[in-house]
Image (cartoon, helix red, strand yellow):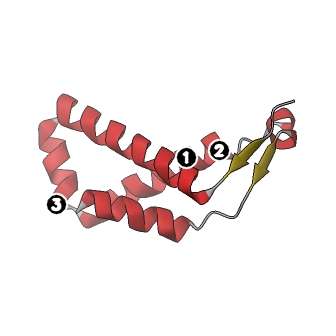
C-alpha cells in the first residue's frame, strides 16, 4: 500500500504546471485569444478557478481506493490563486 502526503506546496506546483501548460497551448493555437486573456482580468480569474478545480480533482480524487491511500493536509486556495496571479502579472 502506497501512502501519499499532499501538501500545499505540491498543490501549488501542480496548479502552476497546469497554468503554464494551458497558457502555452493558448499562445500556440490562438495567439489573439492569449493576449485578450492577459488583458482581461475577469477571464483570467475564470481560468484560474478552472485550473484550481482541475488540480483539486487531480489531488483529491473521490474514488474510495484513492481516498484510503492518501493523507491530505489543508490547502489554502487563496494562496494558490495568489501564486497564479503572480505568474499572470
Q: Secondary structure at mark 1?
A: helix
Question: What residue is at 26 percent from the left and 65 percent from the top?
Answer: 41
Q: Position of residue 39 (x, y in %)?
A: 16, 60
Q: Position of residue 24 (x, y in %)?
A: 26, 36
Count of number-bearing discs: 3
Q: Position of residue 19 (x, y in %)?
A: 37, 46
Q: Secondary structure at mark 2?
A: helix
Question: What residue is at 19 percent from the left and 45 percent from the top?
Answer: 34
The residue that mark 1 highlights is 55
In this rendering, the answer to whether 82 lies above or below 17 is below
**Marks 2 and 1: in contact by CB < 8 Å?**
yes
Residue 66: quarter of image:
top right
Mark earlier in primary sequence (3, 2)? 3
**Image quarter in which the N terminus is found:** top right
Residue 4: quarter of image:
top right
**Image quarter in which the C terminus is found:** bottom left
**Marks 1 and 3: in contact by CB < 8 Å?**
no
Residue 59, disc: 2
The residue that mark 3 highlights is 39
Q: Position of residue 8 (x, y in %)?
A: 59, 59
Structural distance between the alpha carbons of marks 1 and 2: 6 Å
**Of 34 and 76, the residue lying toward us:** 76
Question: What residue is at 72 percent from the left and 60 percent from the top?
Answer: 73
Q: Secondary structure at mark 3?
A: helix
Callout 1: few (<14), some (14-19), or many (20+) C-alpha neighbours within 10 Å?
Answer: many
In front of the other: label 3 or label 1? 1
Callout 2: few (<14), some (14-19), or many (20+) C-alpha neighbours within 10 Å?
Answer: some
Direction from residue 63 to residue 26 in the image, left or right = left
In this rendering, the answer to whether 26 lies above or below 74 is above
Amino acid at each position: 500500500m502506497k501512502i501519499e502526503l499532499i501538501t500545499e506546496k505540491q498543490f501549488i506546483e501542480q496548479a502552476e504546471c497546469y497554468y503554464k501548460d494551458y497558457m502555452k497551448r493558448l499562445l500556440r493555437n490562438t495567439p489573439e485569444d492569449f493576449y485578450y486573456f492577459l488583458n482581461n482580468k475577469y477571464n483570467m480569474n475564470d481560468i484560474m478557478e478552472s485550473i484550481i478545480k482541475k488540480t483539486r480533482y487531480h489531488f483529491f480524487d473521490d474514488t474510495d481506493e484513492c481516498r484510503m491511500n492518501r493523507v491530505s493536509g489543508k490547502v489554502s486556495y487563496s494562496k494558490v490563486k495568489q501564486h497564479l496571479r503572480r505568474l499572470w502579472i
